[in-house]
Each structure stands twice: as structure tokens, then as C-alpha cells.
Image: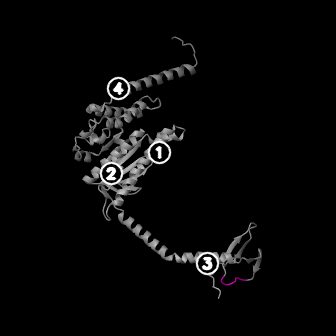
């Protein structure tokens, strides 16, 4: 007995003619044949009609429907899973008090534009490696969270969100979160400094929601304000609240948060491992850490296209650099501030001479009349 097929695939309520193909030719039907499927066709001339499915098309449609019906249970399970994920997400939508850092990668925009406009290949590679390093840290934190027991969080509960050249880092508001923050800043500075990229940021305690790329809350606004309005130089500074709490020195003589001339505490990123004493005599480690910074400062000092407003940030960095070298003479690295300022003076003189020559070349040389 022939299997009865399902009803038509389109609504035949409209009064269009009905056709089927017989030996490749269209044959008009007076009425619909029961159990057959039909499709609506509009030809190149604009004529509209219903066309009966061929036996092959019917067989294909039957197979598709059978596959759809067979997957009903799996679809039901998937819908249930999605509903549970939505419910879980909605339940998680609440602010937590977290240690939050907003970090900006300085020079990223200009470096990207230079690379895109035919800059050297090395700069493009450096950008790619730096971005991979930032993404790698984000995936590292996700891996740590995956290792935690169900219903628990990894030590310090590190979370990372990245957009363009900015990072939002947050941690649990406890001693484990404090340690995880320092570890994160050390990893990021160690990853980006060799590529000539410095960090500026702010760290606060505040209300935050952060899951994956989604992050919002007052803590971000407060940390961003510190980064954009207060930090000014390539430093990651603490809020007044945290600066008053985090004043202890590190084990081994290191200092994680250094006091700047304006009273703000900032992350002490130049010394290897925050300058802990058991690294003081390791000259190779010091030079690996500091030489890229020294080269960067000299490079920016000699850059005729570097505005004074930008060089001021590197001048601050040079002062910090010299202070660290002075405190750790075993590092074997020469001070840089005086050399950078002298070089900057030469650049300014060269720029002035070029301007004078340009004026003389283009202005009409009329004799001056004495009054």
C-alpha cells in the first residue's frame, strides 16, 4: 500500500493555476491531487502558479521531515539547556564587591595605524604578539576557573574582559584577590614591555558585574576615572582607599606599590618580581627587564615626530627608571633621564632649524625698511 504523503507545502488559497511537469512539460491540472506537495512559482514573465512536486522532490521532502521528527527529542533537550542557561545568567545578574582594574595599553592606537600604513614588519609582529599575550592571559583565567570545583571559584577569582586596547581585570575582595591582581599586573607588564608598550590604569574596590566579555558597574567608572584623569603617566595607581590598606612590603624586601612624588601609590613594575632581595644580584635578570625600557625612552626622546605632551610621559618613566637603578646598583644599567633630556634638546634644536630654513625658503625676500 502506497504511503500517504503529507499535505501541501504552501497555502493554495490564492486562485493561481496549478501545474505539474510531465516529460519536462507543464501540464495544467483542474484541481489539487490529494497527498501531493506544491510550491509557488513566479516565472521571469511575472506569471504566478502552483507547481506539483516531482516524485524525487516528494521523496526528499519525506526524508527531511523524517529527520526533523527524529530530532524532536534532541531539540527538546537543547531548548531545555538554553532555558537553563538563560535562567542561570539572569540569576547571576547581580553586583559583587570586587577589586577592579581598568588598564589602557599606551601607544596601541598609533602603533596599529603605523603598522596598517606600511610600517615595518617588526612592529606588526610585536602588536600581534602583544595582543596574543593579552588574550592568552584571558584564556588562562578561564582555564583556572574551569579547574575549580563545581560551585566554587579559583583562588582570587580572576576575571578578564578586553576591548580594543583596554583591559578590565577584577578579583575577589580578599587576600587571594590581592595576590592574583599583582600576579596579573606582573604577567601583563612582562608581556608588553618587551614590545615597547606601556600600561596606564587605575585600581579600585567597587561594585561590578563581570562574566566573560560582559562587564559593567560603578567600579569600572571609578577605575577609568583614575586611569584617564589622574594617572597621566604610564603607571597603574591605587584608589586612596586601597593605598591606605595595601602598604605592607613584599616578602624578601620587595615593594609592590611605590609612592610617587604626587602621593599616589602605583604598581612597581620595573624591578624584576617587585625588587625582591634574592634577585638583587642577578644582573642578567635586571638587564632583561630594564634594557627594553631604556631603549624605548631613548627612542622616544630622539623621535622628531613625538609631541612634547607624549614625551612628558617618557620623561616621567625615565625618572622612575633612574630611581630604581640608583636603589639597585648591582643591576649594572646606566641612568637615562639626563641622556634623554639632552637628546630631546637636540631634537628641538633640529626642529627649530628646519622651521627657520623653511621660512627663509618660502617667504619673499623683500628688503626691510627702517622706520
Residue 299 at what x, y percent from top left?
A: 43, 31
Nearer the viewer's eye, disc 4 or disc 3?
A: 3
Mark 4 lies on residue: 338
Mark 2 lies on residue: 100
**C-alpha distance separating marks 1 and 3:** 51 Å
Main SS of the magenta part reads loop
Nearer the viewer's eye, disc 2 or disc 3?
A: 3
Q: Where is residue 237, by image quadrant? A: top left
User: Which residue does the image show at 27% across and 42% down from the upper left?
Assistant: 257
Vertical comparison of 352 with 104: above or below:
above
User: Which residue does the image show at 48% across and 42% down from the upper left?
Assistant: 125
N-terminal-most mark, 4 or 3: 3
Query: Which residues make up the magenta segment?
Result: 31-35
Residue 332 at what x, y percent from top left?
A: 31, 30
N-terminal-most mark, 2 or 1: 2
Element at label 4: helix
**C-alpha distance separating marks 1 and 4:** 33 Å
N-terminal-most mark, 4 or 2: 2
Amino acid at each position: 500500500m502506497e504511503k500517504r504523503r503529507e499535505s501541501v507545502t504552501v497555502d493554495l488559497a490564492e486562485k493561481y493555476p496549478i501545474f505539474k511537469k510531465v516529460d519536462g512539460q507543464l501540464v495544467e491540472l483542474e484541481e489539487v491531487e490529494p497527498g501531493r506537495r506544491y510550491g509557488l512559482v513566479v516565472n521571469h514573465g511575472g506569471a504566478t502558479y502552483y507547481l506539483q512536486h516531482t516524485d524525487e522532490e516528494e521523496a526528499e521532502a519525506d526524508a527531511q521531515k523524517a529527520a526533523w521528527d527524529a530530532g524532536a527529542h534532541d531539540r527538546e533537550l537543547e531548548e531545555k539547556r538554553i532555558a537553563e542557561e538563560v535562567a542561570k545568567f539572569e540569576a547571576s545578574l547581580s553586583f559583587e564587591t570586587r577589586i577592579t582594574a581598568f588598564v589602557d595599553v599606551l601607544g596601541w592606537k598609533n602603533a596599529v595605524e603605523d603598522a596598517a600604513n606600511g610600517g615595518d614588519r617588526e612592529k606588526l609582529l610585536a602588536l600581534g604578539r602583544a595582543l596574543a599575550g593579552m588574550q592568552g592571559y584571558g584564556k588562562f583565567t578561564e582555564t583556572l576557573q574551569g579547574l575549580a570545583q563545581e560551585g566554587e571559584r579559583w583562588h582570587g577569582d580572576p576575571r578578564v574582559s578586553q576591548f580594543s586596547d583596554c583591559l578590565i581585570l577584577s578579583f575577589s575582595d580578599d587576600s587571594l584577590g590581592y595576590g592574583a591582581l599583582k600576579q596579573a599586573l606582573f604577567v601583563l607588564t612582562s608581556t608588553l614591555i618587551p614590545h615597547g608598550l606601556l600600561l596606564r590604569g587605575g585600581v579600585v574596590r567597587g561594585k561590578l558585574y563581570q562574566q566573560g566579555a560582559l562587564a559593567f558597574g560603578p567600579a569600572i567608572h571609578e577605575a577609568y576615572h583614575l586611569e584617564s584623569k589622574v594617572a597621566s603617566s604610564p603607571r597603574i595607581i591605587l584608589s586612596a582607599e586601597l593605598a591606605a590598606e595595601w602598604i605592607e612590603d613584599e616578602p624578601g624586601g620587595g615593594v609592590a606599590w611605590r609612592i610617587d612624588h604626587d602621593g599616589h601609590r602605583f604598581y612597581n613594575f620595573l624591578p624584576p618580581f617587585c625588587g625582591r632581595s634574592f634577585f638583587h644580584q642577578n644582573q642578567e635578570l635586571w638587564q632583561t627587564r630594564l634594557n627594553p625600557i631604556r631603549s624605548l625612552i631613548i627612542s622616544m626622546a630622539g623621535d622628531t615626530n613625538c609631541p612634547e605632551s607624549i614625551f612628558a610621559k617618557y620623561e616621567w618613566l625615565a625618572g622612575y627608571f633612574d630611581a630604581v637603578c640608583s636603589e639597585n646598583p648591582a643591576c649594572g644599567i646606566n641612568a637615562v633621564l639626563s641622556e634623554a633630556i639632552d637628546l630631546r634638546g637636540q631634537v628641538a634644536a633640529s626642529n627649530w632649524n628646519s622651521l627657520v630654513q623653511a621660512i627663509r625658503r618660502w617667504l619673499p625676500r623683500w628688503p626691510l625698511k627702517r622706520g
